[in-house]
Amino acid sequence: MMTDFYNNLETREPGQRQIEQIQAVAAQVAHAKATCPGWAGILHAVVASDITSTQAIAKLPITRKSSLVELQKNNMPFGGLVSSKAAPLAYVFSSPGPINEPGFEVPDHWHFARALYAGGLRKGDLVHNTFSYHFTPAGAMFDSALKALGCTVVAAGVGNSEMQAQSIAALKPKAYVGTPSFLKILLEKADNLNLNVSSLTHAVVGGEPFFPAQQDFFKARGLNVLQGYATADLGSIAYETPARQGMVIDEDVYVEIVRPGTGDLVADGEVGEVVVTNFNKHYPLIRFATGDMSAILVGQSPCGRTNRRIKGWMGRADQAAKVRGMFVRPEQVADLVAKHEALVKVRLQVKQINGQDSLQVLCEVKNTLSETTQLITEGVRSVLHLRGEVVLHAIGSLPNDGIVIDDQRER
């Protein structure tokens, strides 16, 4: 196992990191309010100097990725969230939504070099980059990080697997970056063409789930493949290390896990939505809800990095469903829990029986009195505007998977 680190931030004493990150969040709030009109509006009631604890950070307003669409419509191209003191704008990317994302003339702007270093990439390495360079920032994101590490980049982009396999055989790069599924395609294409691509010994993958079968396939070929977790807006959020025990949170972000539909923190180990505050002075994002699900792992990584870890990507938090013609959203489920002191956790289960929508409201409760059932039933009608069968459960008995609305109907 590799024991060297990208820099000493990775091995800070956890208490010291927490103090420094709280200070960094407070500084980011002050900076955003002063230089970004969009953030000045969102954070108008926030006093940066009051942010002195993790609890204070948890009280800041949530800004959802989905809200960027409306913000940008009203204030093109970036919703007023780019700093007036930002570096020169080098790129404008566009993701589905559409959502515009800026890129700046800043080395390793998306701070992915740390994740690549953990994946074994070093100065002088030749790296085959198959992330797209078109519209979305993934190609440029890794390109920028690889150049910051001193690597040479084969700017392959996506598609044309035969040409790419031939390029790998001819140029003999050490490493691959891209999706795990395309790496498998390239290796199998090389096998079919009888090409020697054994120069590839390392890979950092992302952009999609990394399934166990894929991991076994690469391991059998002697490839050291680690995964990173990032978004187009935030850049790197967490990354796998040679320990392969969860994903270490990047030093350039502050990560919280909240109950879907709320800004409320969940306990370590409980699955919830990933919320991130970055330390990017050019494009600040504060308590930015990614819509992705994960959970904090207890303890530190055996690799020696001391930051907290997440389990990795565990699905999506935007679980809205339409039941009997009415939309039901996680925010409503959170309102239902808040209205009833006896409620600890609620999970809506939607099925279709004899062609009709059926709604069960599964509730972890502090007591199982019949009066409790009646009160919750009335609350369901009031908050969800639907009738549902309330089923009471003991605390801790519902699945810990972050699912708030379990839609089991066949599509």
Image (cartoon, rainbow, N blue to C red):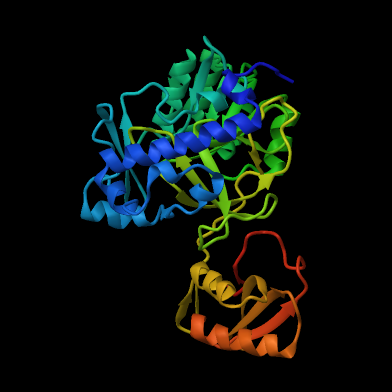
Q: How many marks?
A: 0
In front here: 67 or 122?
Answer: 67
Residue 191 in the image: state x and y as whole percent.
64, 28
Residue placed farthest to the left in the image?
A: 75
In front here: 239 or 212?
Answer: 239
Image quarter hosting the N terminus:
top right
Residue 95 in the image: state x and y as whole percent.
36, 46
Image quarter hosting the C terminus:
bottom right
Q: Is residue 243 above or below residue 409?
A: above
Image check: 229 left or right of 152? right
Residue at 68 percent of width and 85 percent of height = 372
Residue at 55 percent of width and 58 percent of height = 264
Q: Is residue 64 above or below residue 116?
A: below
Residue placed farthest to the top in the image?
A: 124
Query: Looking at the rendering, which quadrant does residue 283 occupy?
Result: top left
Q: Is residue 272 visible?
A: yes
Query: Looking at the rendering, which quadrant does residue 175 occupy?
Result: top right
In front here: 353 or 309?
Answer: 309
Query: Looking at the rendering, which quadrant does residue 134 occupy?
Result: top left
Image check: 212 left or right of 273? right
Residue at 66 percent of width and 84 percent of height = 390
Image check: 91 left or right of 231? left
Q: Is residue 242 above or below residue 77?
A: above
Q: Is residue 101 visible?
A: no
Residue 407 in the image: state x and y as whole percent.
59, 71
Residue 37 in the image: state x and y as whole percent.
24, 46
